[in-house]
Amino acid sequence: MDKRFLVCGGDLRQITVANIISSYGCDVAAYGFGCNEGFSSTVRCCADIADALSGTDIVILPLPCSLDGTTVNMPMSAAELTITELLKHMNKNQIIVAGMVSEKITNLTHVYNIYISDYFEREELTVLNAIPTVEGALQIAMEELPVTIHASKCLVCGFGRIGKLLAKALQSLGADVTVSARRHSDLAWITAYGYKGVMTDDLKSVLADQAIVFNTVPHLVFDEKLLGCLGDNALLIDLASKPGGVDFNAAAQLGKKVIWALSLPCEERC
């Protein structure tokens, strides 16, 4: 393969990506990591974005590519790179592959005539991405609860990829599992899998008895009214990406225990 790559921003996963591509004999540059630690000797680390892009065919941005829709997600670097600045230094023969590309960023690439592909739209990736999210959620629950998941009443809000895998994992641990969904077809599948089902609009009716609530829906579900229905000792784990599915200010005022698991792999869009 004679393509030249730039791995731009991200965390240790992006460093691994750079090293793997380089191991195939490809020319790989890296930008936006702050230091060169972790990269193989064959990866060229750059301090200047123009230098990094020189001769590059494919730019690989992280997952998610941006947290604010304006700057490249570069948690390992003190520097800041806006999406606009990146595009200004590119030419129409270069392409971007990135994860969770917003409509705003897509529109910007059209303005600068740069092709972008969102790899997080690939079903095989989003499904496999859900597995470590579920494992991380279970670890948090086990660390935070004074009791076992076994025999505990657990509510999974949302029946997307993560919700499906999480409900299955909880059931295998012996939990009493309830799953909420908005569609009647999903409720039918929830029943078929042996879980209890509830419409999302009727969450109030089941919240009081739940020991653990896992939210997977990436928009506000648990407002002040619903949070007030949680038991005093309940644990709410929000697995949704920003802006999350919980009114965190209201949760704090009500004294509810909420953990926003942003360190876990990114939530699906639904």
Image: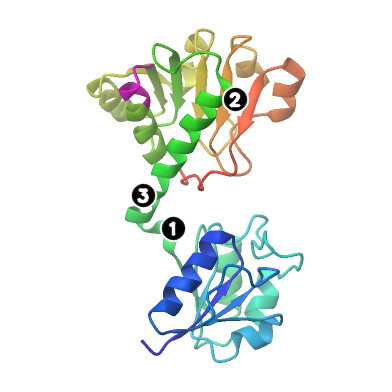
Local crowd size for mark 3, using a 10 Å CA cut-off: few (<14), some (14–19), many (≥20):
few
x, y percent for residue 213: 51, 22
Query: Marks 2 and 1: which is nearer the front?
Result: 1
In the image, 202 versus 263, the foreground residue is: 263
Color encoding of the figure = rainbow
Question: Where is 245 relative to 229, above or below?
Answer: below
What secondary structure is marked by label 2?
A: loop
Residue 216 in view (yes/no): no
The magenta segment:
170-175
Question: Where is 40 relative to 127, above or below?
Answer: below
Query: Marks 3 and 2: which is nearer the front?
Result: 3
x, y percent for residue 90: 60, 84
Identified by mark 3, the residue type is Leu
Image quarter hosting the N terminus: bottom left
Quadrant assignment, res 131: top left
**Is residue 173 a member of the stretch shown in magenta?**
yes
Local crowd size for mark 2, using a 10 Å CA cut-off: few (<14), some (14–19), many (≥20):
many
What secondary structure is marked by label 3?
A: helix
Q: Name the residue at 40% across, 84% down.
A: 25
Does residue 58 appear left or right of residue 163 in this picture? right
Residue receiving disc 2: 222
Q: How far apart are the two marked residues, 2 and 1, measured between alpha carbons?
A: 26 Å
For marks 2 and 1 on the same chain, the one whose residue lies earlier in the sequence:
1
Question: Where is 169 relative to 194, above or below?
Answer: below
x, y percent for residue 99: 50, 60
What's the mark number on residue 128?
3
Identified by mark 2, the residue type is Phe
For marks 3 and 1 on the same chain, the one whose residue lies earlier in the sequence:
1
Q: Name the residue at 55% across, 68% down.
A: 61
